[in-house]
Amino acid sequence: MRVILLEDVKKLGQKGDVVNVAEGHARNFLIPRGLAAEATQGKINELDRQNQIKANKHKKAEEDARLLGQRMDGLKVTMSAKVGDAGKLFGAISSKDIADAVKKQHGLSMDKRKILLESPIKMLGVHDVAVKLHPLVQVSIMIEVVAE
């Protein structure tokens, strides 16, 4: 019997897969538990339509990230902070501070979780920071930290 999996099923397949299973397994286990539905032509067409919509959304998100990445690549952001001895900052500059500064100086809104900081910035100078806008799109921005 052919069924469409509604959930991931171990040793059988992922959500959305159309698989052949024993009729008893489908009728007594998969369908009553909501793990699968019988694969009629209408349901297969609906699944194809949903997969096409999902693919279009992913493609649009990637295109938007590439456009934003082109605008952001090589962007320079200047931030001021209180400084102690030897150019060390009082406190640190975090990814939230960087996101706020980019929004304020350049009008580009970004999620602080997309800024890839290995550790908070604690020294004066110019620092390259990676920003991962999409799994396939990563850009680098320059953060210049100056004394207040």
Image (tube, helix red, strand yellow):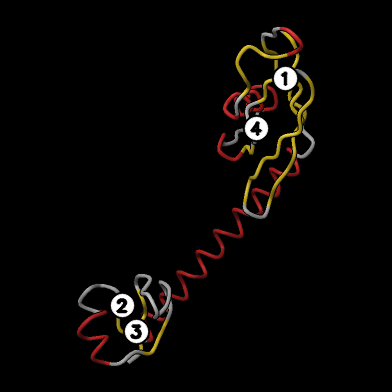
Residue 47 against residue 133 in the figure, above or below: below
Q: Which amino acid, by three-letter code, is at mark 4? A: Leu
- Give the mark nearest the N terminus, 3 or 1: 3
Q: Secondary structure at mark 2?
A: strand
User: Which amino acid type corresponds to the residue marked 2 in the rendered image?
Assistant: Ala
Query: Where residue 141 sits in the image (x, y, percent)?
Result: 74, 34
Q: How many tags in the picture?
A: 4
Instruction: Say left or right for 74 vs 103.
Output: right
- Classed neighbour count for the residue bearing mark 4: other residues with Cα under 10 Å, few (<14), some (14–19), many (≥20): some
Distance from label 4 to label 3 (Cα)?
46 Å
What's under tag 3, amino acid-wise?
Val
What residue sits 37% from the left and 80% below the top?
A: 4
Viewer-nearest of discs 3 and 1 = 1
Separation of residues labelled 4 and 1 (CA atoms): 25 Å
Residue under the point 65% across and 23% down? 101
Q: Please name which of the two marks, 4 or 3, marks the residue nearer to the observer.
A: 3
Q: Secondary structure at mark 1?
A: strand
Dot 4 or dot 3, earlier in sequence: 3
Specify the amino acid type for callout 1.
Met
- Identify the residue position indicated by label 2 in the image: 36
Residue 69 relative to residue 114: left or right: right
Q: Which comes before the other along the chain, label 2 or label 4?
A: 2
